[in-house]
Image: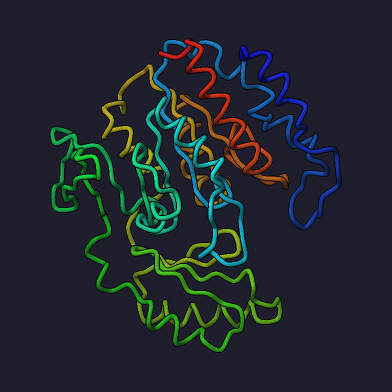
Amino acid sequence: MGLPRLIAKLSNLKSVSSSKFDEDTTKWHSYDAWIEKHPSALETFQKMMCGAESKKIVLFLDYDGTLSPIVNDPDVAFMTDKMRAVLRDVGSCFPTSIISGRSREKVYEFVQLDNIYYAGSHGMDIMAPVQPSRIREWKHHATAVDKKGNKLVIYQPANKYLPEIIQKSLKEKTAAVEGVKIEDNKFCMSVHFRNVSDEELDTLEEKVKTVLEEHPHFQLTRGKKVLEIRPPIKWNKGHALEYLLESLGLASCNEVLPIYIGDDTSDEDAFELINQKRQGYSIIVTSIPRETWASHSLYDTTEVMLFLEYLTKWKKIGLAP
């Protein structure tokens, strides 16, 4: 099946029909109005790939809400076997990395693929290809070997704060809040409140802030139904994207075409970086219109899977370098 025919077939799966949204959530009145500014990466795929034949495509993905659905219990955020197969295929076609707020080890347990790279803790724990000539500061690096015997480098810019990560104190102070879940993501602590009642949200935030008072140099950030305590370093998913491009020898390459797909507010740093470089595509995964740096959109994880299938098909029919 050729690409135009494949796209025509899959395009029958419409993103979403026009609907109204809560004005407290967004200034946009309908998905249709919002998508004019952030067009579907499925419906505009051929336009996006026009001229990309001579480019080196590099793919970056968030995990939760992008490769797996958002679930009430973060411990069971499993990706489907179908998504894993699609991710394996696209990873065999293009350099592919997952950049997640989860710990790197936990993301690997979920994904279980060895042909992609992993960055956990919002990019503060990266396993990447070894490029010694490009490593400026070895004190944050360690070498490793994957299951296939390939040499890799682990980069942990917040390593000196690891002994101070404050899981015990956080669990003790929030224990009385029903529904809260504390997740140790190595270089950041995640406080999930998806199952916390609205009446207790303010109480939970106050308790989290009391922990921060004991460790004032740490910082508090917010994601989808989660509060996160992070080390005080200037490092985010945008920096992780740059580091991975550097590790691949593509940071200064005019022919590189990075594609970043994510659903969380933490992905906005990577979206903004791609926009500033005017090189590549940033794709937000959302069913609700919201302000974003992303240039394109996908409605949910099903559409992410279709987009990855598009990329693989595009490569295999001989249009990619």
Which residue is more in the foreground, 306 or 173?
Answer: 306
Q: Residue at x 75, y 32 (%)?
A: 13
The residue lying toward the viewer, choosing from 233 and 173, is: 173
Q: Residue at x 52, y 29 (%)?
A: 281
Residue 102 is situated, as x and y percent measured from the top left of the image, at 43, 58
Asked where in the image residue 29 lies, by quadrant, the reply is top right
Q: Which residue: 23% across, 49% down?
A: 154
Residue 231 visible in image: no
Indicate the position of residue 234 as horizontal and vertical percent values: 34, 53
Q: Is residue 6 above or below residue 81?
A: above
Query: What residue do we see at 54% from left, 34% from top?
Result: 282
In front here: 73 or 200? 73
Q: Is residue 76 visible?
A: yes
Specify whether 143 is left or right of 213. Answer: left
105 is higher (above) or lower (below) than 97: below
Q: Examine the image and state in which quarter residue 283 appears.
A: top right
Quadrant of the snapshot with the C terminus: top left
Q: Position of residue 210 (x, y in %)?
A: 46, 82
Q: Is residue 154 left or right of residue 193?
A: left
